[in-house]
């Protein structure tokens, strides 16, 4: 999720997603201040990536979170992760 969303409090959205779902939440934000990063993580984000970022770093972080999700739900194979118009095959 991108931490700057018009009309939405991003930290509240992270908290809402976290309480409703065990899926990993990765915040992608232009906010680079350590206070913003800490607040995002404390709101429930599993990871926080600041812009600009390198695509290989984003892909590696998604893979790590998918691996943890596989372990958590006891499913060896998650074939596709989809969201926001993107499809990722770990």
Image (tube, rainbow, N blue to C red):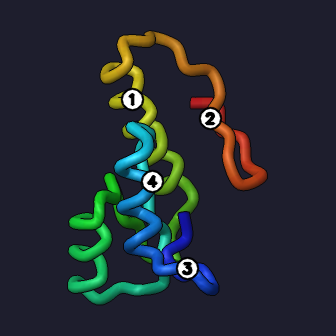
Give residue 15's position: percent from left, percent from top: 36, 61
- Give me the C-alpha separation between circle 2 and circle 3: 24 Å
| Foreground label between 1 and 3 | 3
- The CA span between labels 4 and 2 is 16 Å
Comparing 76 with 74, the one in front is 74
Residue at 36 percent across and 12 percent down: it is 74
**SS class, disc 1:** helix
Q: Nearer the viewer, mark 2 or mark 3?
A: 3
Residue 69 numbered mark, or none = 1
Residue 81, labelled with which disc? 2
- Cβ atoms at labels 1 and 4 below 8 Å apart: no
Residue on which disc 4 sits: 17
Quadrant location, the C terminus = top right
Q: Secondary structure at mark 4?
A: helix
From mark 1 to mark 3, how far is it between C-alphas? 27 Å
Q: Which residue is mark 3?
A: 8
In the rendered image, residue 45, in percent from the top left (x then y), is placed at 34, 58
Which circle marks residue 26 in the picture?
Answer: none
Q: Secondary structure at mark 3?
A: loop
- First of labels 2, 3 by sequence position: 3
Mark 2 vs mark 1, CA separation in Å: 11 Å
Residue found farthest to the right: 85
């Amino acid at each position: 999720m991108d931490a700057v969303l018009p009309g939405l409090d991003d930290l509240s959205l992270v908290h809402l997603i976290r309480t409703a779902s065990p899926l990993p939440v990765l915040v992608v934000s232009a906010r680079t201040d350590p206070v913003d990063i800490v607040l995002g993580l404390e709101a429930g984000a599993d990871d926080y990536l600041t812009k600009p970022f390198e695509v290989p770093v984003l892909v590696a972080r998604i893979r790590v979170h998918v691996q943890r999700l596989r372990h958590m739900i006891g499913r060896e194979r998650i074939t596709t992760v989809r969201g926001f118009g993107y499809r990722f095959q770990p």
